[in-house]
Amino acid sequence: MRNIFKILGIAILLLLIACSNEGESEKNIIKIGVTGTDGAQWDVLKSLAEEENIDIELIEFSDYTLPNNALANGDIDINSFQHVAFLSQFAKENDLDLVPIGSTVIAPLGIYSEKISNISELKEGDKIAVPDDPSNLGRSLRLLETAGLITLKEGTGLFGDTTAIEENYKNLEIIPMVAQQTPRVLKDVAASIINNGIAGQAGFDPAKDPIFLEDGHDDSVLPYVNIFASRAEDADNEIYLKIVELYQSEAVSKAIEEETKGGSILIQVPNEQLLETFETLKGEE
């Protein structure tokens, strides 16, 4: 009888050890929606996450309209491809309960050209391609205004379109299009305003190649800080917030610096400030 109890005890002990080992080896698989997976920072982030028993799976989307819908539908866990202004407008227009949960980088917007080397060389009636989504279109118009090419009507918010132009000093033809197309039409236009990430994917150096560049250190660019986003109900998810924390590490910052040659800057914005900016922008008409 004693032998039977001993055997049962050993069996139970082995079962407990097996269950314990299984729990230790079980990873948390997190799907992150992105619009480009070639950045060196993702490999660094994956390695850091592995040490925390988190397995990151990058899900790549072909355009900006897809990752937020996929997040809202539960096809992915979080996404990282957009800035605060884009999320606020998209969530409002599509009635999606999504929120920012952490900052990533600020990527100054640039004007690129294959035909001219200085913004002053633009001629009467030249064509300028700009991204057509509301937040980046409004941002592009602000950049053209900063460059002295147009003046916007008083009271124009962040989401102004071409009807908000008060003065167009060279009668430029401003052509909104899907953001991913802006580098592809450079041969057909005088210049394109290209999002930083898309410019990098197209082979440009976002820090050196633009003929005119947004000031990434100005306080006014807070709406254009890139973010991780989640469903509102998951905003306090510890694993998601751990991924945000890992992204803010020195190792990821170094990878971003090397990958973008200074074109993108890792930036830490308190979540309370991100949410405040997000809610303010959602309230704008």
Image (cartoon, grey):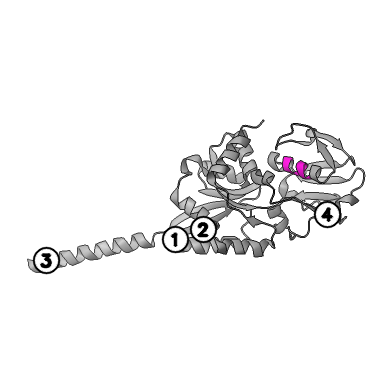
The residue pinned by badge 3 equals 4
Question: Residue at horizontal 77%, vertical 45%?
Answer: 143
Tell me which label, 1 or 3, sits earlier in the chain.
3
What SS does tag 1 mark?
loop
Q: Is residue 129 magenta?
A: no
The residue pinned by badge 2 equals 246
Depth check, mark 4 against mark 2: the one in front is 2
Most common SS among magenta residues = helix
Residues drawn in magenta: 138-143
Frontmost residue, 98 versus 22: 98
Position of 170 with respect to 56 (left or right) is: right
What amino acid is at disc 1? Glu
Tell me which label, 1 or 2, sits earlier in the chain.
1
Depth check, mark 1 against mark 3: the one in front is 1
Tell me which label, 4 or 1, sits earlier in the chain.
1
What SS does tag 3 mark?
helix
What SS does tag 4 mark?
loop
Looking at the rendering, in which quadrant would you find the N terminus? Answer: bottom left
Q: Is residue 86 above or below residue 247?
A: above
Tell me which label, 3 or 2, sits earlier in the chain.
3
Q: Given contact means CB atoms under 8 Å apart, are the residues at marks 1 and 3 in contact?
A: no
* Relative image position of residue 112 (x, y in whole percent): 80, 53
The image quarter in which residue 96 lies: top right
What amino acid is at disc 2? Leu
Looking at the rendering, in which quadrant would you find the C terminus? Answer: top right
Residue 192 can be seen in this image:
yes
* Relative image position of residue 84 (x, y in whole percent): 62, 43
Q: Which label belongs to residue 52?
A: 1
Question: Residue at horizontal 76%, vertical 42%?
Answer: 142
